[in-house]
Image: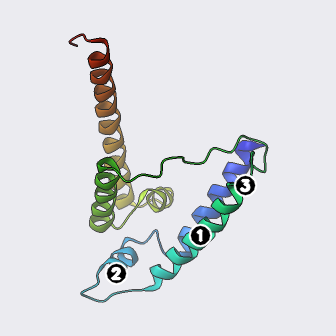
Amino acid sequence: MYACGAFVAGLVFGVGLLVSGMVNPAKVLGFLDLAGAWDPSLALVMAGAVAGGAVAFAIAGKRASTLLGAPMALPMARGIDPRLVLGSLAFGVGWGVAGFCPGPAMVALGAGSVKALAFVAAMLAGMLIFEVAERARANGSDARQTGSSA
């Protein structure tokens, strides 16, 4: 049942991305082009998403389990640290250069977009680099805690 719920949620999200134009890099780049032919329509999409998300998080914060019975797992981190800022900057630069963010890129990839294929390949490479760096950082931290030199 959980997989079915996840599938339906993903399907609704993907259809919403298609309807809103978020899978079209030209539309996204038009929104980001404040000095040129600015397209403000994406601001309405984002405002709707933020409002919907705020309501959903408010309701979810009061529940111990999801509607399908799984334990509620909400993010607990509240602080702003250099890793969050750098990750946000990397996301923003990627979004501004390519006109894609991960969700719309996956939808566009499913629609056969070659640009989305290039973006998803670069995104996966970035995720792999992050994982390797995180493991190296964790191993270095473990070595410092035990007092050995790795």
Q: Nearer the viewer, residue 118 or 13?
A: 13
Q: Quadrant of residue 131?
A: top left
Going by the image, does 82 lie left or right of 79?
left
Structural distance between the alpha carbons of marks 1 and 2: 19 Å
Q: Nearer the viewer, residue 56 or 105?
A: 56
Q: Position of residue 96 (x, y in %)?
A: 29, 68
Q: Quadrant of residue 116?
A: bottom left
Structural distance between the alpha carbons of marks 3 and 2: 39 Å
Q: Which residue is mark 3?
A: 62
3 or 2: mark nearer the eye: 3
For disc 3, the neighbor class at 10 Å (few under 14, some 14 to 19, many from 20) is few
Q: Secondary structure at mark 1?
A: helix
**Nearer the N terminus, badge 3 or badge 1?**
1
**Residue at x-position 48% and y-position 55%:** 106
Q: Nearer the viewer, residue 120 or 76?
A: 76
Quadrant (top left/top right/bottom left/bottom right) for the N terminus? top right
**Residue at x-position 27% and y-position 62%:** 93
Disc 2 marks a residue whose amino acid type is Gly
List the single residue furthest toward the bottom. Answer: 37
Q: Nearer the viewer, residue 48 or 114?
A: 48
Disc 1 marks a residue whose amino acid type is Gly
In the image, residue 128 above or below residue 41: above
Q: Secondary structure at mark 3?
A: loop
**Nearer the N terminus, badge 3 or badge 2?**
2
Disc 3 marks a residue whose amino acid type is Lys
**Residue 42 circle label:** none
Q: Which residue is mark 2?
A: 30
For disc 2, the neighbor class at 10 Å (few under 14, some 14 to 19, many from 20) is some
Q: Which residue is mark 1?
A: 16
**Residue at x-position 39% and y-position 86%:** 39
Q: Secondary structure at mark 2?
A: helix
Quadrant (top left/top right/bottom left/bottom right) for the C terminus? top left
